[in-house]
Amino acid sequence: MSRLRLVINADDLGYSQERDEGIVHCMRNRLVTSASLMVNGLSAKTAAASVLSLASDFDISLGLHLNLTEGLPIGSTYDTLLDAKGQFWDKCSFREAALAGRIDFREVREEIDKQINVFEKISGIRPCHIDGHQHVHIITGVSESLAQAMSKREIDVVRIPIDDNAENCPWLEKDLSEFFKNVLKDSLTAKKVYQENGILFTDAFIGLTTMGSSMTIERLQDLLKPLIPLSSTATSIPSNSLYTCELMVHPGYRTGSKGGCGTGPDEFSQSADREYEMDILAKMASSSFYNDNNIELISFHGLTH
């Protein structure tokens, strides 16, 4: 039987103390194997320290969750990245501005560099991988800027959120479904950009359609089962590696009044959805599904070592 190597990555580390405590709990109990840090998050510094203290004992990888669409930037002198309040444009406004040519990508490159610099300063390590908050890293212009920065800094792994199931999910609200269609379209273009710059990514990706209350054990298993028999034929990873998949998750305890990226916490972080995801991940881990289907849980270190 072929073996599937699965990275379970927790997004939004550093968003709040409660979020971070939930993610650390998931790491200790092997519910997740990796995390992505928002360096403009309220608790980024303490979050990085907490995860790094677990990294060697639990094989945890820590990457950068590049944020250009929520809260306050690390830099401050931008003309095209910020609204009248000095905050990042929201995800839809940023994408529209980028497609319309209203974003100065010199500013994007500067903010990317600043966020990587802050990550390295507060963690003492280079990011193992980079992905984008609300998938900003696959938007045309951003992907080119980030790929060049990663190649220059020898950061090897990026997320390519091509989840083919996103186009056939009746449980998704219409606006979210439309957003995911744009993510898939952008991902196909960005994939070529990252490949040309020698950046690695997993063979498969799931998680767009299983966020919050949309996550169920049955859906996760139904998404993973078709990947299990596949052999490693993709060119995105070394030929001697087995087939790999990233599962994007958003666990954490419910955020209180303190959190966010300089402008307060959003509704999703204050809802019960994060704790609900923790519960589903715990039930997956306690079941025999991974063992029965020869699924090996790895961190992103497993893609490059």
Image (cartoon, helix red, strand yellow):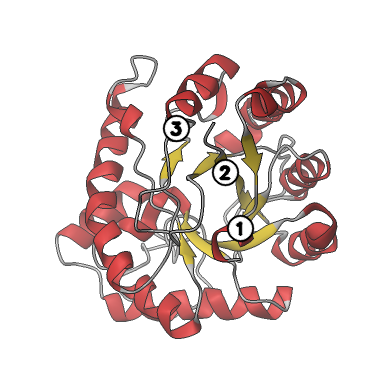
Residue occupying the point 42% across, 36% down = 230
Label 3: element kind: helix
Marks 1 and 3, how far apart at CA? 18 Å
Label 2: element kind: strand
Judging depth in this view, the residue of 149 and 85 nearest the camera is 149
Judging depth in this view, the residue of 288 and 101 nearest the camera is 288
N-term-proximal mark, 1 vs 3: 3
Marks 3 and 2, how far apart at CA? 10 Å
Image x and y of residue 139, in percent: 28, 58
Contact check, label 2 and label 1, Cβ < 8 Å: yes
Residue underneath mark 1: 302
Judging depth in this view, the residue of 177 and 292 nearest the camera is 292
User: Would residue 126 appear left or right of 146 to someone viewing this image?
Assistant: right
Marks 2 and 1, how far apart at CA? 9 Å
Q: Is residue 29 above or below residue 197?
A: above
Q: What residue type is labelled 1?
A: Gly
